[in-house]
Amino acid sequence: MKTRILGFVAAAGVAATTFFALFVVPADVNQGDAQRIMYPHVASAWLAYLSFGVTALAGIGWLWKRDLRLDAIAHAAAEIGVMFTAFAIWGGMMWGRPIWGVYWQWEDPRLTTTALLLALYAGYLLLRRLSDDPERRATRAAIVGTVAAIDIPIIHFSVEWWRGLHQTATIASPDRVLNPAAPLLFVGTLLGMLAAFTLAWLYLMVRRYQLARATDAREEARRLDRIVSARTAEAAR
Amino acid sequence: MNALRAEARVAIAVARKDALSELRGRHATVSTLFFAAVVLLLFGFALGPDSTRLAAAAPGLLWLAIVLAGLLAVNRLHLLETDDGALEQLALYPVSRRAIYAGKALGGFAVMLLLGVLVLGAVGVLFAVNILAHLPVLLLTVVLGALGVAAVGTFYAGITVRLRAREVMLPLLMLPVLAPLLLASVKATAAALGGDPFGELGAWLQLLLAFDVLMLVIGLATYGYLLEDG
C-alpha cells in the first residue's frame, strides 16, 4: 500500500514537473525549445549514476555479508540504471541534433563516457542472465559491477584528456546555459524534476526488488522440486 | 617478507606451468598471432591503399590488433585450465589466491608481450611506419599496454571461463573496461611516432601505468572469489 502511494506521488510529480518544463518555463534565449530536453536529461543522468553507485555498493555488500537480498538490490539498480542511461543518451542526442548539428559529438567527454557506461552495465545484465546458480551469479555480478564502477572515473578522465590535452571545454553544455530571464523558475523546475524522478526511481527500485526476490524464490522452489522428484524416483527404483 | 617471497614462488610456478604447456602445445600463441596478422591485413583493406592514411591510422590499428588478439590469448590461457578439471585443482591448492592470479597474469603478460612486439613490427612493415627511430618508447608502451590487457584479461577470463556463452561474454565485458587503456596507448604511440611535439607522452604513459596498477590490485583482491565460486 505504501509502495502504491509512493508510485502515485512519483507519477504526479513527474507529470507536474514535465508540465512546468514544457509550458511554464520560458524557452531558452540561445537554444530555444530544445533546451527543455535538459530537464529530464539531467535527471536521468543523475539517476544513472545513483543506480550504478547502488549496484556497486550492494555488490560489495554481497561479497561481504553473503545476503541474497543485497544481490537483488544490485540487480534492480543495474537494470533501472541501464534504462535511465539509455534515456539520458537518447535525450542528449535529441538535444545535440538541433544545437550541435549532429547526434553524436566525439568532442564531448560526457557523451562518450556515458556510452561506455551503457556498454559496461549492459554486459553486467547479460552476465546475470547467463548464470543459473544464484550465489555464483551474485558473486560474478558483484565483481563485474564493482569493477565497472571503479572504471567509470578513469574512463571519464582519459576521454577528457584524449579530446586534447591543451584545449578547454568550449561546448555549451545544457547545465551551463542558464536562462537569464527566469533563473529561479529554471532552477526550481530542474530541482523539482530531479526530486520527482528520484521518487519514481525509488518506486521502480522497490518494485524491481520485489520482483527479483519473487523470481529467486521461484527458482529456489523449482530447484528443491527437482531434487525431491529425483530422490523419489530413486526410492521407487 | 618471507610470505611475500613464498607467494612470488607460487606465482612463478603457475606462470611457468602455463609457459611450458604453451611451449609444448602452442594453443594460444600461434593462433593468436595468426589472428592478429589477419586483422592487420583487413585493416589495410578497410582503410587503404592510400599509404599516408594508413600510416596516420597506424597507432590505432596497432592497438586494436593487440587488444582483439589479446582477447583470444587470455581466453585460451584460461581454457587450458578447464580441461580435466584443472581449475578446481588449482583452487584446491593451499596457497593464496593472490599468488594464483599473479601467476596467471604473469603468463598472460608474457604471451601479450610477445604478441605486442610482433604486431608492432608487423605494423612497421605493413603501414610504412618508422618504428626503429622511436623503438625504446614504443617498446615501453607495448610493455605497459600488454601488462594492462593481461591484468584485465586474466580477471575477466576467470569470470567467463565457466559460462556457456564465453566467446561473446569475454569481449563484451572486457572491451569497455579496456577503453582507457586503448586511449592511452594509442595516444602514447602516436605521440612517440610523431616525435612528441606537445610533450604529452609522459602523461599518457603515466595514465597507462596507473591503469595497470589499479587493475592488478583489483585482480589480486577479487580473483579468490572467482576461484571459489567454481
Image: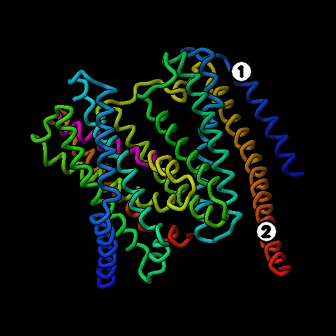
- Seen at 82% across and 46% down, the residue is A6
* Left or right: residue B44 compared with residue A200: left
Identity of the amino acid at label 2? Answer: Arg
Q: Is A161 within the magenta?
A: no
- Seen at 55% across and 41% down, the residue is A118
Residue B226 coordinates in the image, percent (x, y): 51, 67
Task: Point out the image quarter for the C terminus of chain A.
Answer: bottom right
Q: For label 2, count other residues whose C-alpha is less than 10 Å away and answer few (under 14), some (14-19) or many (20+).
A: few
What kind of secondary structure does the magenta stretch mostly adopt?
helix
- Seen at 58% across and 21% down, the residue is A179
**Secondary element at tag 1:** helix
Identify residue for label 2.
Answer: A226
Between circles 2 and 1, the one closer to the viewer is 2
Residue A190 location, quadrant: top right
Q: Earlier in the sequence, mark 2 or mark 1?
A: 1
Identity of the amino acid at label 1? Answer: Leu
Residue A220 location, quadrant: bottom right
Residue A51 coordinates in the image, percent (x, y): 62, 48
Identify residue for label 1.
Answer: A22
Q: Is B192 within the magenta?
A: yes
- How many marks do you count on the picture? 2
Q: Magenta residues, as a range?
A: B176-194
Residue B221 coordinates in the image, percent (x, y): 45, 68
Q: Nearer the viewer, residue A201 or A183?
A: A201
Q: Residue furthest left?
A: B133
